[in-house]
Image (cartoon, grey):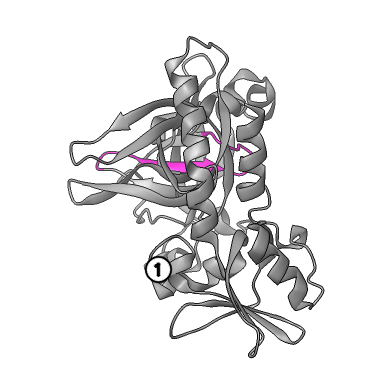
Amino acid sequence: MEKLQNIMELFIGNAGGRENAPENSGHLKKYDTAYQTGEYMMLSFTRVDSVTGDLLLVDEDITVIMPADQINGKPYDLRFRAQKLDDVYCVKVTGIESAGKIVYVSHQAARLEKRPEIEKELQKYLSSKEKTPLIVKGKVLRIQTKNVKGENVDTGVWLDLCGVGIPAFIYIGNWKKTFTETLRGKAIYGDVVDVIVLERVERKNGMYYYSCSRKELVQDPWESKELEEKYHKGDIVKIRCLSKRENHWFGEINGLDDIQVFAEYPSQRHDFAIVPGMEYMGTIYYINAEERSLKARVFQALSLEQIAREDAEGNSGEEEYADMEV
């Protein structure tokens, strides 16, 4: 698998790390040499054309251009110009205009050359009886959602496997070992994650993708005693709402990474709305590491609007809010 690792590091090893892109010397000769030999170059760009989406790099007196359709093989949505500009690319020089000192490069051409080698290694692994998991890198492209009873529910993450354009998918249940209600803020475009390749999935339309998992590669917070050391039944905590369901909602507690809280809606005595993104004060009433379950009830909204509304209604609970942080 050494060949696969070398190719993968070339295409995805520096993703998200512009500082790793080599400095350019400003000489046309190095581009001409790369053009003649087919050598790959690692480039980061400094400007994106607002009309065409082309990426540009001014290297002293030379202008390096990567056309928009040469990034991933087709024109991209111009709303994502900043994302494209932020990446570091493994490219091939595809043309040189010596008179105008313009160099054309293509990331897509480099990907197409190396993709068959990666696919061959993947198929070799999947068809063998090798029990050692094959761990590769994937670049997050987007979160897949599904409409369920009028709500958008995250179902998984699409990846560019090994950075050469191989489609891969992580089902939300394989994202981590703990329950994952939402992937927003956890899987971000451009993030590079280690994954285990599970199988190749063929679609009816002739397309395919590789099913992957990362949960075996991340720490399970329930397996440590940190949770029981930090929190106990009856503790009052701040809970930020992540998402809502019909009979309950999910939140997170500061300091409890990757463990989501099952929360009840406020009782009639506490009349305030639950809004995703807002924080609330609540009490932990159930915590069980074996069942991997953490439940809480909220009794106070941590918002200026709530305070103002209850003050206007003549609420007598001024003491309750006296020490509240807003």
Q: Point out the residue furthest to the front here.
A: 36
Q: Pick the residue in front: 267 or 245.
A: 245
| Left or right placement of residue 150 versus residue 191 in this view | left
Q: How many marks?
A: 1
- Secondary structure state at the residue bearing disc 1: loop
Relative to 144, does residue 218 appear above or below in the rendering? above
Q: Quadrant of the C terminus?
A: bottom right
Q: Which residue: 71% across, 62% down? A: 18
Would residue 49 appear left or right of 43 to someone viewing this image? left
Which residue is the site of mark 1?
76
The correct choice, above or below, for 231 with respect to 92 in the image is above
Q: In the figure, 274 relative to 126: above or below? A: below
Q: Nearer the viewer, residue 74 or 17?
A: 74
Q: Is residue 99 visible?
A: yes
* Observer able to see residue 213: no
Q: Is residue 255 magenta?
A: yes
Name the residue type under label 1: Tyr
Q: Position of residue 280 (x, y in %)?
A: 49, 50
- Is residue 100 located in the magenta-colored stretch of the structure? no
Would you call the spot at circle 1 few (<14 residues within 10 Å), some (14-19), or many (20 or more)?
some
Percent x, y of residue 3? 64, 33
Q: Position of residue 315 (x, y in %)?
A: 42, 61
Q: Which residue is more in the foreground, 310 or 49?
A: 49
**In the picture, which quadrant includes the N terminus?**
top right
* Magenta stretch: helix, strand or loop mostly: loop
Q: Residue at (40%, 34%) from the top-left corner?
A: 210
- Seen from the viewer's position, the closer of residues 303 and 71 is 71
Q: Residue at x 19, y 41 (%)?
A: 205
Q: Which residues are magenta?
A: 246-259
Q: Residue at x 43, y 64 (%)?
A: 306
